[in-house]
Image (spheres, rainbow, N blue to C red):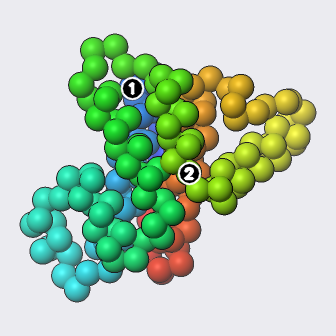
């Protein structure tokens, strides 16, 4: 099972805490996989013991498309909010911030994908009218798919 399959599996039956934490873990694993493939010797990278924010910055330094930086940063903030909350819920503001952090192309891909799936299953599903949790799922799935594609293009198995 590759990372993207693990992400999709993690969305099944999870509460909001589980969805946020697991999605963050999968996204971070994609970033780590990319980094390990781009450095001469991954053991030195591991010895750096980078936190998530540093991992994002290192990935950008080594060539990750900077259009993903705001969304990856926003995802990290949501994860941190969940880590320090007794009753974590995905707020409307958090999901709006995450969506706003996407570049226009990624927003188009997200909304077009939802529209196609909606049409195929005969339902009228819209990103903005979905629950906060479902919006988070849509956005993180698109981010993970972009990272999956980046890994694939770099010849990296995930």
- The answer to whether any part of residue 14 appears in the image is no
Which badge, 1 or 2, is on the more N-terminal residue? 1
* Horizontal side of residue 134 vs 25, given as left or right: right
**Cβ atoms under marks 1 and 2 closer than 8 Å:** no
In this view, which residue lies farthest toward the bottom? 40
Q: Residue at x 28, y 20 (%)?
A: 85
Q: Quadrant of residue 138?
A: top right
Task: Give the secondary structure at mark 2.
Answer: loop
Mark pair 1, 2: CA separation:
22 Å
Q: Position of residue 7 (x, y in %)?
A: 49, 46
* Horizontal side of residue 29 vs 152, given as left or right: left
Residue 49 drawn above or below residue 149: above
Residue 69 drawn above or below residue 141: below
The dot on residue 102 is: 2
Q: Residue at x 26, y 81 (%)?
A: 39
Q: Camera-side residue: 145 or 158?
A: 145
Q: Quadrant of residue 88?
A: top left
Task: Give the secondary structure at mark 1.
Answer: helix
Residue under circle 1?
17
Q: Position of residue 112 (x, y in %)?
A: 77, 50
Q: Position of residue 62 (x, y in %)?
A: 34, 77
Q: Position of residue 28 (x, y in %)?
A: 35, 54
């Amino acid at each position: 099972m590759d990372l993207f399959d693990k992400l999709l599996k993690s969305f099944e039956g999870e509460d909001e805490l589980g969805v946020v934490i697991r999605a963050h873990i999968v996204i971070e694993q994609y970033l780590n996989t990319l980094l390990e493939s781009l450095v001469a010797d991954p053991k030195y990278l591991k010895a750096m013991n980078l936190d998530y924010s540093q991992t994002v910055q290192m990935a950008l330094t080594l060539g990750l498309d900077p259009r993903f930086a705001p969304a990856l940063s926003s995802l990290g903030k949501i994860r941190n909010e969940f880590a320090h909350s007794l009753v974590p819920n995905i707020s409307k503001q958090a999901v709006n911030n995450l969506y706003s952090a996407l570049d226009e192309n990624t927003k188009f891909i997200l909304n077009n994908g939802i529209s196609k799936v909606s049409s195929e299953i005969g339902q009228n599903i819209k990103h903005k009218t979905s629950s906060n949790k479902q919006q988070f799922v849509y956005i993180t799935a698109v981010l993970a798919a972009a990272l999956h594609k980046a890994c694939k293009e770099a010849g990296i198995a995930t």
